[in-house]
Amino acid sequence: MSVIAMDTATDVLALAVADEDGRLMSSLVEFLPRAHSRLLQPSLGHLLAGARMNIHDVKLCVTGVGPGSYTGVRIAVAAAKAIGHACAIPIVSVPTVDGMAMALACAEGQRFGAFMALIDARRDRAFGCWYRLEDGRLWAQCEPTVQALSDWFAIADRERASIVASGRRLGDSAEAQGVRVRPWNEIAPMMPTALVRLGLSGSYERFEGERVHDLAPLYVLPTEAEAKLGAKGEGGE
Amino acid sequence: MNILAIETSCDETSAAVVADGERVLGQVTASQMEIHRQFGGVVPEVASRRHVQAITRVVDTALAQAGLGFADLGAIGVTMGPGLLGALLVGVTAAKAYSLATGLPLVGVHHIAGHVAAALLEEPDRPPVRPPFLCLVASGGHTELYEVDASFAFKRLGGTRDDAAGEAYDKVARLIGLAYPGGPEVDRLARLGDPGRFSFPRGLLDDPSLDFSFSGMKTAVLVALDKLKRQGQAVPVEDVCASFQAAVIEVLVEKTRRAASMTGHRTVVVAGGVAANRGLRAAMQAMAAEEGLEVHFPSPALCTDNAAMIGAAAYLRAQEGRFDTLELGAYADLTLEEWQSGRYPMD
Ligand SMILES: [Zn+2]
């Protein structure tokens, strides 16, 4: 019996096969932008084979649901829904930023402290969330959201939070503003462990049976077309 | 062999179960037309979001309609291109995950081959067609003439040099202020108008090639509308639609007639969204009667984007033992030649 976990919302593809106690049996982290759709299913097949597991031994599927790249996040979510449907197993949805923050805590060997995960959202904004880690448990201090980088950095400064940041531009902006961030591609090797740990923590929504079809990405932002339409509807332009 | 087929190339999330490439056992299409109507056209990101929302539910419902489970299937077919990349990716990703989860082999299908394969599906009032035949594909994205041989291989005879026929319909509909998608509405209004009221150009009609050009027609409609406006006259919408439709149909029918006489094919298939156009159907039937040809149209429901047609094409490919791996990609610009050869472009 095993658990699979995956995330495709950033430039990093993270995959894990673990046992029911959350011990990794095989995992993969690829920093290969725009190749997630190619690699996800074959890699998962290889990981299962490497762990001497069959897809029918999988009893739980953990998936990162974003926020992050819109196209990217749909890859893991669509795959998880199809696997959950065909194998009739539950899916646990974990925000990608939660996984990133947990991966950062793991990488730094911390069980306590404040952590922040950011993903470039262009125009000096970032998708993100910040957390308090208490004895290894992650407590989100806000909803995953998008806001100006300067606002994120102000929170991090106030809370003395360690930051993990995905996106080169974001790293450059942080450096320019004298803010220390850990680059995501350096922390990402801990993402498979983080996803499995969070997925088995019981703190996240579980989609089971008919509800597998309801699983959706966490986009945070409406599409530009919908935002414009909404603005019109409210009398603005 | 029962094939589960998935189609998400544009704005319809569709799944179907097709037996032996000809019998539709179940089909569900979650249409996004109402959503995109608000935006006056398909918004790619909106379409992709709807696809991922609906994808597994349409599969589940199609299987339930067929009364089958995954264990009763022989393969999974999916549209791999051409189309909107983000939209295609949702279908391809789900199909590959279903393939991994069930061990069923995977078949990537070219969207246009799917439109043509719609003619191979059994329908209540019409026996399925078998290749070889001549085929006109006319849709929002394509206007192409092909020879289809006995093994369902395509040879392109000609095609549009600019706009697709369906695109011209939608653009003209927008010019006269009809709601999206305007094609069917132009068809409806055309039957109420005078096709001789305006003389719109017949693009490339006198050109010996089997190519088409529709951008000039759209421009001519714009010029005519401007003139009416300057003269302070109301737009005779029905007459504009009738005259425009007459021009488009004349070229489509004449080039098809020529292609039939050049190739010697006696069977003609008209496929794609524009094949649902009633004016085109009538004119093609009349031409076929004059020339002693047999012309086939899939039913209107199978002319628009749907997964059953993808299942029919996937079946033929599976019969040849041509399957794809879990590395299958999605391609916005995949050509029929690339699909036929199996040499997909590199990203
Ligand atoms: Zn189409």
Image: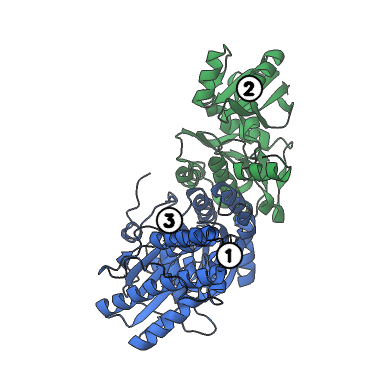
Chain colours: A green, B blue
Say which residue appears at 45% left-offset and 68% top-offset.
Answer: B115
Label 2, residues with CA under 10 Å away: few <14, some 14-19, many ≥20: many
Q: Nearer the viewer, mark 1 or mark 3?
A: 1
What residue is pinned by disc 3?
Answer: B82
Give the chain of mark 3: B
Label 1, residues with CA under 10 Å away: few <14, some 14-19, many ≥20: few
Instruction: Give the camera-side residue of B150 and B19.
Output: B150
Q: Secondary structure at mark 2?
A: helix
Q: Position of residue B146 (x, y in %)?
A: 33, 69
Give the chain of mark 2: A
What residue is pinned by disc 1?
Answer: B234
Mark carried by residue A105: 2
Q: Secondary structure at mark 1?
A: loop
Q: Position of residue A60 (x, y in %)?
A: 64, 45
Q: CA distance from mark 1 to mark 3?
A: 40 Å
Give the chain of mark 1: B
> Is residue A36 at least partly visible in the picture?
yes
Label 3, residues with CA under 10 Å away: few <14, some 14-19, many ≥20: many
On screen, A87 above or below B240? above
Say which residue appears at 66% left-offset and 40% top-offset.
Answer: A237
Disc 3 marks which amino acid?
Answer: Pro
Q: In which quarter of the view is residue B189 placed?
A: bottom right
Disc 1 marks which amino acid?
Answer: Ala
Disc 2 marks which amino acid?
Answer: Ala
